[in-house]
Amino acid sequence: MLPPRQQQGSGLTGSDGRFAPSPTGPLHLGNLRTALLAWLFARSEGARFLVRVEDLDRSRVRPGVEEAQLLDLRVLGLDWDGPVVRQSGRMELYEGAIATLDSDGLLYPCYCTRAEIRAAASAPHGISASDRYPGTCRELTTAQRVERGAARRPPALRVRSDGARMTFEDRLLGRFEEEVDDFVVRRNDGTPAYQLAVVVDDAAQGIGEVVRGADLAESTPRQILLARLLGLPEPVYAHVPLVLGPDRRRLAKRHGAVTLSDRAALGEGPEDVRAWMARSLGLARVGETPSPDDLISRFDPERLPREPTLWSPESEV
Ligand SMILES: [Zn+2]
């Protein structure tokens, strides 16, 4: 179903936003702050804000986690439009996109294991990043495919990127440019890949602005390429700074009391956590407990910090 604003207008508004958690574990302060920012970007422009549950990787989904994540958003005062959408219920959409790419001759089967890719990528051919695919299966003959198909596990499907260089202008990070490799669009267990599902969903849901953590910026060139190959509209991107632990790595459970329920056990309520997030973003002073509406009225993307926030177990939220 098309969102109402797309039905009325001549295309995307450039501002409808979303938060898309994976129900694999509780949201921590960094995830929650990204959710708050995505909500602020959308709501401060009077745009829709959607929640999408990215639950395609069934082996990592844990029961009860989705409900807990949605409850966290609610108690922080973040509301959303329409029903929550789950990727696990949208397989036909992804399969349709994969079929389109395949019929355009843009996909090929890849029989490599992760270890083989790592070994090939570290061979002295000038390819340094270990997760970039070296193209091993790109030019296999039909006979070679039949042989590998019989001898090995089922193939993944990769897109022919043709060494495309993608550039985009991020609202916070500025200009970003990267050569895209032949990445996976369907895993060898048949699951549509994250990159593909995100692109299909953002377009189908009318998302005009993708606000997410800076660690996902490197996925963006691949997603832009897919949108172009599928003839889908390209959203605007804003990759927001992360919250890091004392070791300067992405905040995680091992860093201590980093979830809303951890903080509640220390006697801190959701309004205290919201106040900490607001202070860390320059939206509140010490001692203030701003409401969600206060934050909307104070929000200015131009004035957001560009650097990660360091969190330590001693941090009082
Ligand atoms: Zn391969």
Image: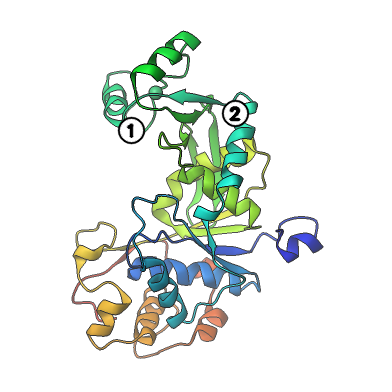
Residue 272, position in %: x, y? 35, 85
Q: Residue at x 27, y 72 (%)?
A: 258
Residue 292 in the image: above or below residue 96: below
- Quadrant where the N terminus sits is bottom right
Marks 2 and 1: CB-CB under 8 Å?
A: no
Front residue of 58 and 272? 58
Residue labelled with disc 2: 102
Q: What numbered label is drawn on residue 129? A: 1
Quadrant position of the C terminus in the picture? bottom left
Q: Identify which residue, 311 or 91, lies in the foreground.
A: 91
Q: Is residue 235 visible?
A: no
Coordinates of residue 267 in the picture (x, y in percent): 25, 89
Q: Residue at x 78, y 61 (%)?
A: 7
| Depth check, front residue: 213 or 270 | 270
Q: Does the numbered disc 1 mark a residue whose Cβ is under 8 Å from ligand 1? A: no
On the rendered structure, is 162 left or right of 115?
right
Q: Amino acid at mark 2?
A: Asp
Depicted 289 relative to depicted 26: above or below: below
Q: Is residue 142 left or right of residue 188?
A: right
Q: Tag count in the figure?
A: 2
Please rate how many residues cluster around mark 2, counting C-alpha atoms within 10 Å: few if below 14, some from 14 to 19, many from 20.
some
